[in-house]
Amino acid sequence: MSPPTVTLLSDFGLQDGHAAAMKAVILTVCPDARLVDISHIIPPQNIRSGAYVFYSCYRYFPKGTIHLAVVDPEVGTQRGAIAIRARACCFVGPDNGIFSLALREESEWEARRLENERLRPGPLSRTFHGRDLFAPAAAHLACGFPFEEIGPLCEPVFPNWHEQWVGKGEVRGEVMHSDRFGNVITNVPGKVLEEQGPAGNWALKAGNRVIESIGETYAQVRAGEMLALTGSTGLIEIAVNRGSAASELKLESGTEVVFKLSNS
């Protein structure tokens, strides 16, 4: 039997020991765990960005993977702590929408509050629930702790940004993330546009820039030119061929984007 896989995603960065502390807790509880870093350089407190990065890769991990995600600007407050069992994996983290993009792709899941004190190895600090609450919970799940004993059933938080507004000939969404290449990713799936008309018939307005149609590949425009297209995650993104749309547009997470269908 292969060792359990636990992934980690956070906004802790690489300068300090926060990510290492979570790994230490996991390995203490579950020494055989195989740890995989998704990212620790999510922009600080940017739940949208964390939700997108997690959504972009979680489904490719082996069945039974435990995913630990901590982007937690409300740590120490009354915000919930949650574990979610999906068809092929479990999610552990703050109940603030970090898993919302992934959950909209899952047809079956069950959520529970992290309330069983047997999951905690010691006191719970007010500023580092990643180490004191979420990491030990993830480790116990990886080692076979019964999911039903974690805590009571609950309904996760779904922020308004996890979905887009869809009207006739118009779709409104927002910016989720800017990647290393400067591509600006929205929360709007290409398939949502195509339900009303071909991608090439849609125009996109983001900030003060209008892109007249949705393309297919980065290289269909000349170097330095901007386009929009459906990226590898199925979401519409804005890109500059061999350049950075993020640098040119300076769009922050949460900035509205508007798609309009021609002749509508």
Image: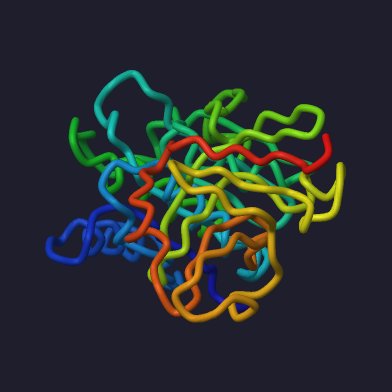
Front-most of residues 11 and 235: 235
Q: In the figure, 3 relative to 129: above or below?
A: below
Quadrant assignment for the C terminus: top right
**What is the tally of numbered marks visible in this picture?**
0
Front-most of residues 176 and 1: 176
Left or right, 213 with reference to 27: right
Residue 201 picture location, percent across and down: 79, 52
Residue 113 picture location, percent across and down: 51, 28
Q: In the figure, 124 relative to 18: above or below?
A: above
Q: In the figure, 225 relative to 95: above or below?
A: below
At 77% from the left edge and 55% from the top edge, which residue is drawn?
199
Q: Quadrant of residue 124?
A: top left
Q: Tell which residue pokes out farthest to the front in this image.
A: 263
Q: How is the image coloured?
A: rainbow
Residue 130 picture location, percent across and down: 30, 46
At 39% from the left edge and 57% from the top edge, which residue is drawn?
9
Q: Tell which residue pokes out farthest to the left in this image.
A: 16
At 39% from the left edge and 68% from the top edge, which residue is drawn?
244
Residue 64 picture location, percent across and down: 64, 62
Left or right, 216 with reference to 155: right
Quadrant assignment for the N terminus: bottom right
Front-most of residues 262 and 145: 262
At 69% from the left edge and 41% from the top edge, which residue is drawn?
104
